[in-house]
Image: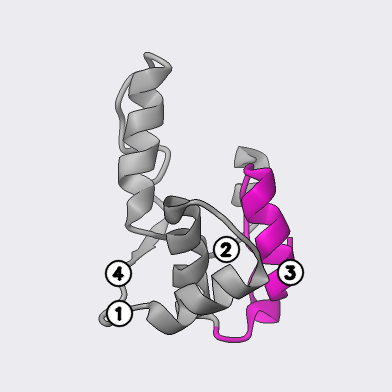
């Protein structure tokens, strides 16, 4: 995943990435560092994402955090075919594909 991520000149994520990343690092007893995501642009929507969330859930069920990441991606790219969605989560990948994101 890290090698694939580096293939892109611009990588963006919802701000939720920080909490998920640091939580996973703690769980795995790894050093907490900002290095991994220092080059990732974090997106903080300036409005509710109800429309995007509805689109995500129409495409399939994902848990709340996964839904938020997908909804944020739709906020950034209303036409999902314009964006590659990187994830290791199979359910999230399935819904991302159903929405039309490049995988």
Residue 2 position (above or below residue 59): above
Distance, label 3 to label 1, CA atoms, is 22 Å
Q: Position of residue 19 (x, y in %)?
A: 30, 42
Q: Which structural element holds mark 4?
A: loop
Q: Which structural element holds mark 2?
A: loop
- Mark 4 or 3: in front is 3
Q: Position of residue 81 (x, y in %)?
A: 71, 79
Magenta region includes residue 83: yes
| 3 and 2 marks in contact (CB < 8 Å) | no
Judging by the rendered image, the residue that carries numbered circle 3 is 98
Q: Which structural element holds mark 1?
A: loop
Distance, label 4 to label 3, CA atoms, is 24 Å
Judging by the rendered image, the residue that carries numbered circle 2 is 9
Callout 2 environment at 10 Å: few (<14), some (14 to 19), or many (20+)?
Answer: few
Q: Position of residue 31 (x, y in %)?
A: 33, 19
Earlier in the chain: of badge 1 and badge 2, it is 2
Q: Position of residue 16 (x, y in %)?
A: 34, 53
Quadrant position of residue 20: top left
Earlier in the chain: of badge 3 and badge 2, it is 2
- Mark 1 or 2: in front is 1
- Mark 3 or 2: in front is 3
Q: Which residue: 42% across, 52% down?
A: 65
Residue span colored magenta: 78-103
Residue 26 position (above or below residue 21): above
Residue 44 - label: 4
* Residue 38 appearing in the image: no
| 3 and 1 marks in contact (CB < 8 Å) | no
Residue 81 position (above or below residue 62): below
């Amino acid at each position: 995943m890290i090698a694939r991520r580096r293939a892109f000149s611009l990588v963006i994520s919802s701000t939720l990435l920080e909490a998920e990343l640091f939580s996973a690092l703690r769980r795995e007893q790894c050093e907490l560092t900002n290095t991994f995501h220092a080059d990732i642009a974090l997106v903080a929507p300036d409005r509710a994402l109800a429309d995007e969330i509805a689109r995500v859930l129409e495409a399939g069920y994902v848990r709340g955090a996964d839904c938020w990441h997908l909804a944020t991606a739709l906020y950034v790219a209303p036409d999902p075919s314009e964006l590659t969605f990187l994830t290791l989560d199979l359910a999230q990948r399935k819904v991302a594909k159903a929405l039309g994101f490049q995988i």
